[in-house]
Image (cartoon, rainbow, N blue to C red):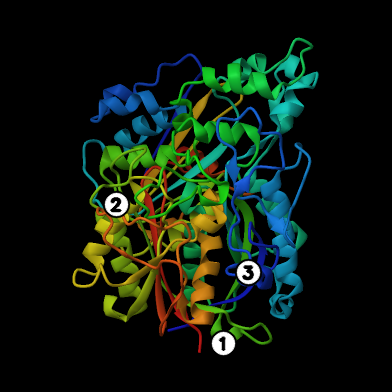
Amino acid sequence: MKVVFESFSLNDEIPALDYLKKRKLIKFFNRETSAGIVCIARLLDGAALPTNTPFYYGKAHIAYEDFEVEKLVDASRDETGSFSQENFINRGISGLSPLTQFKLLYNMPLCFISQEHNLTGDNAVIYKSAQGLIIQALHAPGNLPVLLGAGKVHRDGRVESGFSLALKEEIEKAPLPGGVDEAIEIFRYWHERGQ
Amino acid sequence: MAKILITGAGVNSPLGCSLEEFLRNMTAAPYGIDHIRNFDARFFPVDFGAEVRENGEIVKTGPEVDRKAFFIKRAVKDLITASPDFENYPPAKRMIHMGAGVDFFDLAGYVNSEDSRAGLLYNYCRNSDRVVDELAEMYDIRGGKSANVSACVASTQAMGLSFRVLKHSPGLEIITGGFDSMLNPLPFMAFYKLGAFSNYPGEAKHACRPFDKNRSGLVLGEGGIAFLMQREEDVKQNHPLMEVCGYSSTMDAYNATDPHPDGIFLAQSALEAIREAGITPDDIACVHLHGTGTPKNEIAETKALALVFPNRFKEIPVFSLKSQIGHLIGACGAMEMLGVLYSFQNQVVPPTLNFQDPDPDIPLHVIKDEPLHMKIDYILKLNSGLGGQNTAFILKKYE
């Protein structure tokens, strides 16, 4: 069972382009996806996965990203500072980049990583829950190693990403931290234990 | 091999707020799409939506209410109230796996608050997974839980996981399904920016036109759907609705916005589900498709069906429920299982509403105007999501 865990602070440049074969995808990425691209590349170290490798991803709450919310909020106020539906439509939403959606949608890290690595097999995006991600992995179809990943952008802007490639039996036997809540905690724990 | 059954349903939908009301309104009041009424949409470039109705009236809530949470809590309560078997399982043998939409954000409440001056926007955000946590807490569900957020296949993936868990683990019961509402200003307009909405110039109820030559896009819907899934040997007092026989999920890995144009991986998903069910494509009576009413979706589905049913893809009857209830995104596939149930119970393939002018690029047997009566034992249910995820289910009439 191989595990890679990466952490990038707010000011770190995440070197996704160093690993990206489909370089045009980068415009769609939020920092979580960029970190995921780096992390999985370091996990695979140049090896290609079978295309039908099951892939499950644990998405964390969005605790920090610049999704232009404050710009939208300011543009949506009327002259008294209150919310105005008219301004929201005519000044707020119209000023947002269409690309913002791809940075916001929860399944996009899994989808972009799948595109990059040509993964077409069983898949799922589980929101936050470590337990949910493990249940999903243990019920993967077939006997191929399962690609498990998780990401989190903390409120201070720090991005964490963890990936592992493991057989279901290995996942079942792997120790889990007590009181684990978020999927990313599993990878941090496995990484620290040299799993 | 254990039989996995759906043995109860709690429903909050554009066609009604009970299973009985939904099934009745499949024909009695089949148009769930209208102009949005729950919030002021007069400045919006498009205002079509399929809002949840109860006894014909839109269920109204304030702007601060996370409607998807509101609906699924009602649906689960109704499900459990009507499921005497639920209490037969100890808490450690109860699970909940749900598909969910994106987090709710009360934009107007935030803008109007002092918190907006300090940037404390998280006070106005409600995370979708916490709704599942609350339901688990409320009903003493201790065996495991998850919220799947795989966009348009979130609810079918949640049901697929539930199916797999039950197949391998005796003595469990699972509440599964999905909940979503993008019918509030921020997610509605954010989705609009993707350019996928119908801009149909006529009546709202005709705005979503799956398979039709003049289809121009999807219409958002909303709701919550909760099923009880059990192994057959554990069913005591609940009444089986239908059997789940096969499930598969694949990924196009093609493009962020478009389905794979050849439908290869959607077809693969269907074939895997058929194989798991232990049947052949010839056993399938009809297909309930994703059928969004967008220009590209139905083309990809046609290509997929040509791969699954090479000799009869133009003959096998197909249906889409979305012209009646809109696109429920994180709840769509699970809610559309009610269309599958309707087909089993009535032994019909319903007409796809608003299908008037066939598209030569979609040479499928779309049922028009009147239901097609036929013997239906197995149904293939397909769904696909923005980003390329696909799901396929084989459902069987329970006998």
Counting the numbered discs, the total is 3
What residue appears at the point 45 percent right and 67 percent down from the top-left corner? B369
Residue B88 place in picture, x, y as percent = 71, 80
Residue bearing the label numbered 2: B299
Chain ID at mark 2: B
Closer to the camera, B219 or B340? B219
Give the class, few, some or many, for how many residues have Cα within 10 Å of label 2's Cα (few <14, many ≥20).
many
Q: Earlier in the sequence, mark 3 or mark 1?
A: 3
Front residue of A46/B316: it is B316
Q: Residue A141 in the image: x percent, y percent?
A: 36, 64
Mark 2–mark 1 Cα distance, whole angstroms, equals 42 Å
Residue type pointed to by label 1: Glu
Return the x and y of residue A177 as percentages of the image width and height.
Answer: 57, 47
> For residue B233, which numbered disc appears in the image?
1
Chain of residue at mark 1 = B
- Label 3 and label 2 in one chain: yes
Mark 3 or mark 1, whichever is nearer to me: 3
- Amino acid identity at mark 3: Ala
Query: In this rendering, is residue B120 above or below B380?
Result: above
**Left or right: where does residue B207 sit relative to residue A180?**
left
Nearer-the-camera pick, B331 or B344: B344
* Image quarter in which the N terminus of chain B is found: bottom left
Sequence order check: which comes first, mark 3 or mark 2? 3
The tag earlier along the polypeptide, 2 or 1, is 1
Q: Which amino acid, by three-letter code, is at mark 2?
A: Ile
Across and down, in percent, residue A26 comes to 34, 25
Would you name the residue on which mark 3 appears? B28
- Mark 3–mark 2 distance (CA, rounded to whole Å): 31 Å
| Circle 1 Cα neighbour tier, 10 Å, few/some/many (<14 / 14–19 / ≥20) | few
Q: What chain does badge 3 belong to?
A: B
Residue A173 visible to the viewer: no
Left or right: B382 in relation to B144: left
